[in-house]
Image (cartoon, rainbow, N blue to C red):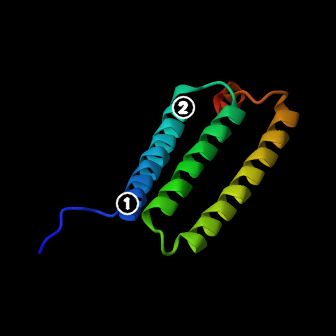
């Protein structure tokens, strides 16, 4: 006999994974939209890239629950290295050019 009733434990697992997927996708999309919308400071661009990374990390945890432990730490480690490298390059750039504005990156300005 086919039962149309679902246990509450199964329903909670499905709905929480769906919420996690929607939230991570919205962070991913919002990070890229914010990255494309701002054109002034390099630091805000780096923060937008970090928001995209958090969205990817949440998407990995929501979509692959079996291997998410290993993938979570790999992507988290890459994100930490990326943010440290970006911040150190930003400090070097700000000290040499005097600001963190994108307008100083123009190679044709002399």
Q: Residue at x 59, y 71 (%)?
A: 69
Residue 88: x and y in percent read: 81, 48
Of mark 1 and mark 2, the one earlier in the sequence is 1
Residue 73 percent coordinates (x, y) = 64, 67
Q: Residues within 10 Å of mark 1 (few under 14, many from 20)?
A: few
Which quadrant does the C terminus fall into?
top right
Most extreme residue toward the right is 95
* Residue 8 - label: 1
Q: Secondary structure at mark 2?
A: helix
Pick the residue in front: 27 or 36. Answer: 27
Say few, some or many: other residues with alpha carbon within 10 Å of mark 2 (under 14 / 14 to 19 / 20 or more): some
Examine the rendered structure and indicate whether residue 1 appears above or below residue 58.
below
* 26 sits to left or right of 41: left
Residue 63, quarter of picture:
bottom left
| Residue at (51, 42) in percent of width and height | 27
- The N terminus appears in which quarter of the rendering? bottom left
SS of the residue at dot 1?
helix
Q: Is residue 104 above or below residue 57?
A: above
Residue at position x 43%, y 48% in the image:
19
Find the distance from the CA under tag 1 to the CA under tag 2. Answer: 38 Å
Dots 1, 2 in contact, CB < 8 A: no
Q: Is residue 64 left or right of residue 83?
A: left
Q: Is residue 86 or residue 105 the one in the foreground?
A: 86
Q: Which residue is mark 2?
A: 34
């Amino acid at each position: 006999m086919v039962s149309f009733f679902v246990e509450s434990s199964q329903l909670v697992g499905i709905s929480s994974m769906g919420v996690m997927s929607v939230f991570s996708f919205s962070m991913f999309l919002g990070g890229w939209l914010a990255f494309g919308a701002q054109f002034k400071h390099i630091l805000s661009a780096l923060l937008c890239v970090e928001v995209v990374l958090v969205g990817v990390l949440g998407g990995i945890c929501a979509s692959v629950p079996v291997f998410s432990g290993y993938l979570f730490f790999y992507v988290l480690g890459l994100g930490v290295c990326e943010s440290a490298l970006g911040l150190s390059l930003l400090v070097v750039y700000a000290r040499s050019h005097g600001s963190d504005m994108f307008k100083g990156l123009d190679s044709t300005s002399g």
